[in-house]
């Protein structure tokens, strides 16, 4: 076995490179066994650092696309016309700083929302917030690819599947209940988005 290589459990920050690669492999290719083997009540540090590395990598490549004049994070593949290299460099540095920060904040908030739904749908015998936090942190693995214009967004949908598997295994519930926990927030966001588009469309039509 290579030094630093993990075969189960959390990402190991004492051997970050080997453990990161191995954890990515296990999350993506063996999600059921990965989440099943995680400690339910471990500390926040290891999964949070794993997610942070994913966000930093995402920010780096997103920033490179900005420097090249392509805004991967802005409506798929917008060409940044009329922007000089200094403005693009500022965007690059901004991505490196703010993307990881916002990503980490999103993990804590997202885990809280999922945990509330877990308590409502799975019941009081769930494994608690720390278990849900682990699911949210490790599904940040999709950040490694969602910087790719168009294709990355589609590949990131795999994160929904990972979340369902993670909730199911970490809270020892059924696939149906886990899917409800994960899909309800997504459904709410989609519904709100449609309502906003409807309101904007009505106002535009009314202004003619």
Image: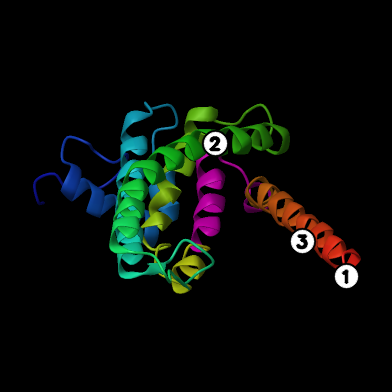
Q: Quadrant of the C terminus?
A: bottom right
Residue 1 percent coordinates (x, y) = 11, 51
Q: Nearer the viewer, residue 188 or 170?
A: 188
Marks 3,1: beta carbons within 8 A? no
| Residue beneath disc 2 | 111
First reached walking from the N terminus: tag 3 or tag 2: 2
Magenta region: which residues?
A: 158-178
In the rendered structure, find residue 197 and report the number of the disc placed on it: 3
Mark 3 vs mark 2: give the one in front.
3
SS for tag 2?
A: helix
Q: Main secondary structure of the magenta part?
A: helix
Of the numbered discs in the image, which one, if any, rests on residue 208? 1
Q: Secondary structure at mark 1?
A: loop
- Which of the two labelled residues, at mark 1 and mark 2, occupies the earlier sequence position? 2
Q: What percent of the width, then of the height, locates residue 178?
A: 63, 48
Nearer the camera: disc 1 or disc 2: 1
Within the magenta stretch, is there residue 40?
A: no
Q: Nearer the viewer, mark 3 or mark 1?
A: 1
Residue 64 is tagged as: none
Is residue 172 part of the magenta span, yes or no?
Answer: yes
User: In the figure, is residue 159 to the left or right of 176?
Assistant: left
- The residue located at (35%, 63%) in the rendering is 66
Badge 1 density bin: few <14, some 14–19, many ≥20, Cα 10 Å: few
């Amino acid at each position: 076995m290579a030094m630093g290589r993990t075969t189960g459990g959390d990402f190991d920050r004492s051997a970050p490179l080997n453990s990161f690669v191995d954890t990515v492999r296990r999350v993506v290719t063996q999600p059921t066994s990965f989440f099943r083997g995680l400690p339910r009540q471990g500390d926040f540090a290891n999964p949070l650092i794993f997610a942070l590395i994913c966000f930093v990598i995402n920010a780096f490549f997103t920033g490179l696309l900005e420097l090249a004049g392509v805004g991967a994070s802005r409506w798929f593949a917008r060409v940044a016309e009329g922007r000089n290299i200094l403005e693009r460099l500022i965007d690059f540095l901004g991505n490196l700083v703010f993307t990881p920060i916002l990503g980490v904040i999103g993990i804590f908030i997202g885990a809280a929302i999922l945990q509330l739904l877990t308590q409502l749908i799975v019941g009081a015998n769930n494994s608690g917030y720390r278990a849900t936090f682990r699911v949210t942190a490790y599904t940040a693995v999709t950040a490694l690819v969602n910087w790719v214009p168009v294709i990355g967004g589609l590949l990131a949908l795999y994160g929904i599947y990972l979340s369902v598997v993670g909730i199911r295994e970490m809270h020892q519930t059924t696939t149906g209940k886990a899917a409800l926990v994960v899909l309800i927030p997504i459904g709410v966001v989609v519904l709100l988005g449609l309502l906003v588009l409807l309101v904007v469309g009505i106002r535009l039509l009314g202004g003619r």
